[in-house]
């Protein structure tokens, strides 16, 4: 039995819960009195705790439990949210995150969280010290628990015990179950898992002996025992468990506060176990009656707890290399399809033609799916930024809002994986250097809350991610002074530099303009790393800025693998693809309409003249020259609000094409953004119209 | 490992070798899409089972006279540092085992190819010399780009 399958699920779901905890905490922070949000947070934390405890990650569960205690008080309006509580909870979340991270990397998920736990406990105690019976109770029980360490019984630690006690006081039932599996059972671990699975549906397994890991790895005899908290009736549960195949017997013992204490403190588990089991029926009936009367309330509560839990996303993880292989195999298939279509049209057998047509439809559906597999919304990177910016702003004592737009924009997975760190750098930079302190902002007559906009959008063959702040902007003089001091530029060069060129100096290695080096940015190792990373992804960073008004970093990223609509054109014997997004229209012009002006050619277009570019000359096409033609087909392209016409020989048609890189060996070619494979198996180059318009 | 498996190919009059594990596949000549404004010996790109791979004319790379391609012409696809490149060679039709110890330091120029591009020279028998290519150097463009700059 492979425990990894649960582990992967646990990690995925933990990350989901942590993310939603983070998001909800931020929401709560801006709206601290909304108890609805607290409820959601509490539920997430509770689920996380349950999962962690089941998987045996004690530290994770313990810390979540303490956070839950605080949240519980808030939820019951016994504690008002305050700033330091937020900070402590956020710290707790960070610790949880790093533990989950550790687990993801194959670690044990252990961490020293005593400081945070103490802080959380102090919050619980600090407000109304007497209102926390659970905490005191567990403190009292602790020594007796410790004395039982040497015994072989299922030992509960302080935390687990307090969980059971709390559940009892909340009207839940605590059960001690002993399950034995039939001797001839082949897959003990599977049956055990089924028992756990069933129980988990109706409550929480607090502790099992042997541990869940050992059970899953088949490291147990025929029986195991566990502590279980539920709202269900013991009498109802027992037949459900026994109905699982190959389960021999189930002994259920009801626990109350005193029997719990007894079990924990007993040194001779065998002798004490018998009386407890004997006493069980009585206890069961007694509590059953109690449970019945109390039934409506917990039931309602259970419904409230379960219903809004977000449906876990049904995903599997696939090695990205496999997707590449899939993609390539699919391209091969496409080529064969085209050949088949040709053959079918020659042979003219209706049955064959039908089949080939059907295959064509299926394969174009398949194509869409294969291409979409690799695309991931940038939200997977963006979603951690609100929290980061909040912390940053806090530590810098600044006020600012982060506005995210276009989070649904999709990018290739490989780019998504790499883009996170550069964006973190840029955001930090904007918060640290861009946005001014509250005092400065007020003095400058600005709103004391700064704004950082993070936006993503598609444009042509690229995705743009922009980070714009309304801070102080970049001071040309300060940068030049620094660059001169560091010997990055000389005085003569500096005088002639355009603003954009000056801003690019920011990306030079070892350049930092922060007067005071802070721990956030300003070590001078930020922006040059950003630039090299983005360049390695085939992208660009540009900066624009207005002193006193703000700065905008614009990151242009290629869609390394994506599907685009393109117009296929022919020039001589060569075929090229022009992305449809850049095309305004196509047309024909007569040779005599072309006018020469200072060596460049212009054609009339609407009310104005636009430049005419010769593809055959730019690309040195050997077997075509439009100057020998009387009429020339043109494609009018656009970059921003500038237009230009490209002269081609003729149009082949519009097509969905797969973007492919030309490989790392070839140097970047002006005007070429990549390649695609056509239906006949040949490679066609994709034209980058942006390069043609200056 | 004392033995080395080597793909043998011909360029003009000489025989060259590339270690087998650096060679992905050997293909017959296929349609090549020209890439404009690139180095002279870069012939363009091919579609190799869905992957676009640049191909270079190895004669051109070594400044040997370029010839027409024929039935014997082959494209050897090599992979170095995750970079895939195709080499157009006159022919490729042999795999041999050579002893590492039999590889000697190359003289300054072999068959018009500078020593820098070579790992060494192996003696196959009395008649045959096998020139081992240093792929990293062959694929290094910086020197070429600089040279082109000077020539301009």
Image (cartoon, coloured by chain):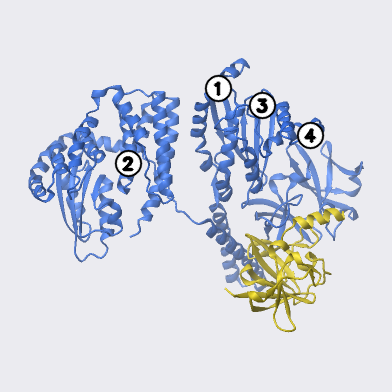
Chain colours: A blue, B yellow
Camera-side mark, 4 or 1? 4
Residue A259: x %, y % from top left? 13, 40
Residue A516 picture quarter: top right
Q: Label 1: which residue?
A: A449
Q: Chain under label 3?
A: A
Q: Label 3: which residue?
A: A473
Same-chain status of marks 2 and 3:
yes
How far apart, in angstroms, are the residues tagged by discs 2 and 3?
46 Å
| Dot placed on the residue nearer the N-terminal end, 2 or 3 | 2
Q: Label 4: which residue?
A: A490
| Dot placed on the residue nearer the N-terminal end, 2 or 4 | 2
- Above or below for A290 versus A107: above
How far apart, in angstroms, are the residues tagged by discs 3 and 1?
16 Å
Camera-side mark, 2 or 4? 4
The residue at 39%/41% (across/down) is A310
Camera-side mark, 1 or 2? 2
- Above or below for A680 versus A318: below
How far apart, in angstroms, are the residues tagged by discs 1 and 2?
38 Å
In which quadrant is the C terminus of chain A drawn? Answer: top right
The residue at 66%/51% (across/down) is A565
Q: Is residue A559 left or right of residue A234?
A: right
Residue A180 picture quarter: bottom left
Residue A109: x %, y % from top left? 38, 46
Camera-side mark, 3 or 1? 3
């Amino acid at each position: 039995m492979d425990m990894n399958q649960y582990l992967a699920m646990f990690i995925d779901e933990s990350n989901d819960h942590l993310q939603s905890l983070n998001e909800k905490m931020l929401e709560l922070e801006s709206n601290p009195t909304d108890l609805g949000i607290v409820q959601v947070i509490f539920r997430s934390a509770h689920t996380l705790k349950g999962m962690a405890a089941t998987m045996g990650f004690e530290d994770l569960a313990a810390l979540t439990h303490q956070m839950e205690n605080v949240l519980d008080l808030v939820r019951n309006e016994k504690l008002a949210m305050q700033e330091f509580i937020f900070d402590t909870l956020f710290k707790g979340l960070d610790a949880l995150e790093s533990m989950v991270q550790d687990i993801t990397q194959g670690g044990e998920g252990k961490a020293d969280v005593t400081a945070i736990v103490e802080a959380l406990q102090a919050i619980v105690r600090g407000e109304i010290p007497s209102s926390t019976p659970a905490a005191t109770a567990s403190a009292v029980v602790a020594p007796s628990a410790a004395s039982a360490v040497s015994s072989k019984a299922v030992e509960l630690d302080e935390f687990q015990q307090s969980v059971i006690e709390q559940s009892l006081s909340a009207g839940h039932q605590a059960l001690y179950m002993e399950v034995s599996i039939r001797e001839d059972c082949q897959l003990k671990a599977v049956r055990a898992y089924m028992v756990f699975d069933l129980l988990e549906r109706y409550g929480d397994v607090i502790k099992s002996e042997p541990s869940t890991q050992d059970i899953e790895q088949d490291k147990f005899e025929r029986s195991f025992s566990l502590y279980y908290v539920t709202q269900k009736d013991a009498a109802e549960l027992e037949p459900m468990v026994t109905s699982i195949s190959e389960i021999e017997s189930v002994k259920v013992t009801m626990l109350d506060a005193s029997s719990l204490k007894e079990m924990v403190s007993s040194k001779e588990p065998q002798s004490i176990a018998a009386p407890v089991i004997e006493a069980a029926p009585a206890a069961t009936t007694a509590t059953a009656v109690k449970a019945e009367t109390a039934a409506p309330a917990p039931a309602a509560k259970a419904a409230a707890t379960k219903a809004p839990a977000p449906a876990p996303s049904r995903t599997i993880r696939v090695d990205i290399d496999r997707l590449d292989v899939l993609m390539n195999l699919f391209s091969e298939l496409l080529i064969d399809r085209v050949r088949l279509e040709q053959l079918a049209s020659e042979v003219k057998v209706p049955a064959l033609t039908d089949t080939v047509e059907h295959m064509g439809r299926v394969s174009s559906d398949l194509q869409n799916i294969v291409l979409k597999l690799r695309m991931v919304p940038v939200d997977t990177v963006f979603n951690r930024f609100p929290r980061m910016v909040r912390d940053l702003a806090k530590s810098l004592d600044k006020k600012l809002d982060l506005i995210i737009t276009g989070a649904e924009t999709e990018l290739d997975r490989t780019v998504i994986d790499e883009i996170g760190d550069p964006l973190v750098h840029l955001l930090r930079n904007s918060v640290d250097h861009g946005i001014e302190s509250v005092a400065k902002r007020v003095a400058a007559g600005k709103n004391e809350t700064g704004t950082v906009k993070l936006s993503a959008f598609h444009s042509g063959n690229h995705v743009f991610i922009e980070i714009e702040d309304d801070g102080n902007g970049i001071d040309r003089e300060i940068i030049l002074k620094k660059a001169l001091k560091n010997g990055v530029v000389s005085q003569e060069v500096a005088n002639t530099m355009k603003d954009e060129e000056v801003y690019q100096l920011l990306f030079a290695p070892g350049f930092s303009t922060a007067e005071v080096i802070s721990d956030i940015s300003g070590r001078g190792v930020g922006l040059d790393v950003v630039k090299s990373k983005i360049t390695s992804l085939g992208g660009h960073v540009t900066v624009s800025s207005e002193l006193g008004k703000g700065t905008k970093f614009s990151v242009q990223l290629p869609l390394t693998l994506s599907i685009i609509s393109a117009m296929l054109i022919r020039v001589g014997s060569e075929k090229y693809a022009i992305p449809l997004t850049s095309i305004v229209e196509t047309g024909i012009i007569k040779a005599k309409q072309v006018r020469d002006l200072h060596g460049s050619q212009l054609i009339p277009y609407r009310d104005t003249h636009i430049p005419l570019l010769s593809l055959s000359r730019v690309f040195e096409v050997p077997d075509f020259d439009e100057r020998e033609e009387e009429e020339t087909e043109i494609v009018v392209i656009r970059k921003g609000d500038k237009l230009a016409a490209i002269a081609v020989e003729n149009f082949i048609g519009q097509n969905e094409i797969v973007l492919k890189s030309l490989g790392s060996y070839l140097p970047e070619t002006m005007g070429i953004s990549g390649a695609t494979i056509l239906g006949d198996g040949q490679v066609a180059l994709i034209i980058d119209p942006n390069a043609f318009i200056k | 490992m004392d033995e080395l498996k080597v793909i043998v190919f011909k360029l003009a009059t000489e025989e060259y070798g590339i270690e087998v594990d650096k060679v992905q596949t050997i293909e017959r000549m296929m349609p090549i899409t020209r890439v404009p404004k690139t180095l002279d010996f870069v012939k363009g790109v091919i579609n190799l089972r869905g992957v676009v791979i640049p191909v270079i004319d190895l004669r051109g790379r070594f400044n040997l006279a370029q010839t027409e391609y024929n039935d014997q012409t082959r494209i050897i696809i090599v992979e170095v540092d995750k970079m895939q490149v195709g080499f157009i060679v006159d022919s490729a039709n042999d795999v041999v085992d050579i002893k590492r110890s039999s590889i000697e330091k190359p003289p300054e120029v072999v068959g018009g190819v500078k020593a820098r591009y070579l790992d060494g020279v192996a003696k196959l028998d009395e008649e045959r010399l096998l020139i081992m290519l240093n792929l990293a150097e062959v694929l290094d463009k910086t020197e070429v780009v600089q040279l082109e700059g000077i020539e301009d």
